[in-house]
Image: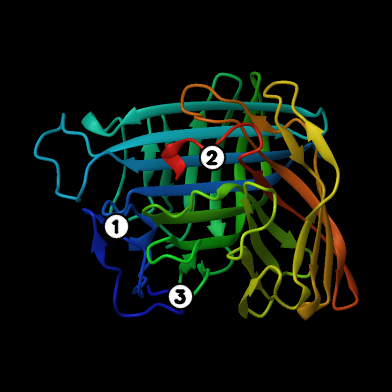
Amino acid sequence: MAAEGGAAKSGAAAGGVQQAVGTREWAFPRDHGQHPAYRLEWWYYTGNLRGADGRRFGFQVTFFRRSLHRGAAPRSSAWAVESLYLAHIALSDIGRRRFFHESRMARDSLELAGAARDAHRVWLEPWRATPLADDPHGVALDVDGEAFGLHLRLRALRPPLLHGQGGLDQKGPAPGQASWYYSLPRLEVTGRLSLEGAGSAVEGLAWMDHEFGSGQLGAELAGWDWFALQLSDGSDLMLYRLRRRDGSAGPFSGGTLLAPDGTATRFALGDAGQSLLPGDWWRSPASGGRYPLTWQIDLPRWAIRLSVRPAFETQELTAGPGVPFPYWEGAVTVEGTLRGAAVKGTGYMELTGYAGTLNPFFE
């Protein structure tokens, strides 16, 4: 199945790795798999859940792949190594304002970690994302940590959303300073959650991001602020601010608005008054990082004005094995107006570069 907006020619190779340039013909479910010719790739699953007892939770499951060599020749031995994998899982217990996170890392030898090249299958044992047989975009997430576990089935309510120009999302002025980037912006979630030995059925909405490229960020950037928001009128909104070291927004900051009728529109922050501005700040007692946790989104083109607030403050993943630098990633709520009508919603927010510089793994 091909995503709308795909094109016929893929990017050119440079320096032994593939660069995100030109055009690409997208085909799913193949493109849910890994793209080993590119240096860096990630699969991001975030969502908001509600238990049968009414308790609210947020979750994150993320797999990162970093190529350890140039080129993409197939391994000749089970011991051979092509990529390093990292995985992060997190659970926000919203009502009790508790945050749990764990991480793992492994090389892909002996199939301890890996990803299929033609299917929505990623793993870092014992954590797995596997395709659903009856949904070309659906995925099962099965992760068990020390404090919590998630066994969720995510079914796509909307087709893949390509960001940028046909999925090529430019992060800077130079050719290749970009990534291939799409989302599954609205996934229906059912399954079970366990926390400290107690299990519960849950349901909710999730968002999936898949991004791959080689060397997307410029040296002038300190980090990014990213939002995935699902609104009550059926709209979905992804936007990010690429943040310069002086705190200002870089010129390639922007996002995509997906209307209820399926119309997708790319926009640039700073163009025609589109803005994303921070409000209240919070200092982490764990890392010392100072994060902007409330935000105002103004998109005059669609008469959109939204306020974003965290479900609670302490949703920071602190540095440790598999987490090269601290970052804030957590559940948020949103409310405001869209074309004069009141809207509300939920989503996820990611804030990086506020507690030290980004590790070269992600640059």
Q: Are marks 3 and 2 in contact (CB under 8 Å)?
A: no
Of mark 1 and mark 3, the one earlier in the sequence is: 1
Above or below, 332 against 173 in this view is above
In the rendered structure, find residue 191 and report the number of the disc placed on it: none
Label 1 amino acid? Asp
Q: Are marks 1 and 2 in contact (CB under 8 Å)?
A: no
Identity of the residue drawn at 55% across and 31% down: 325
Q: Residues within 10 Å of mark 2 (few under 14, many from 20)?
A: many
Most foreground residue, 303 or 335? 303
Q: Is residue 152 left or right of residue 291?
A: left
What is the x, y in percent for residue 29?
A: 37, 63
What is the x, y in percent for residue 251?
A: 61, 65
Q: Residues within 10 Å of mark 1 (few under 14, many from 20)?
A: some
Q: Which residue is mark 2?
A: 61
Dot 3: what SS? Answer: loop
What is the x, y in percent for residue 166?
A: 45, 75
How far is mark 1 from mark 3, CA to CA? 20 Å
Between marks 3 and 2 in the image, the one whose residue lies nearer the viewer = 3
For residue 37, which quarter of the picture? Answer: bottom left
Above or below, 47 against 82 in this view is below
Q: Which residue is mark 3?
A: 166
Q: Is residue 150 left or right of residue 14?
A: right
What is the x, y in percent for residue 311?
A: 80, 41
Of mark 1 and mark 2, the one earlier in the sequence is: 2
Identity of the residue drawn at 10% across and 34% down: 77
Label 2 amino acid? Val
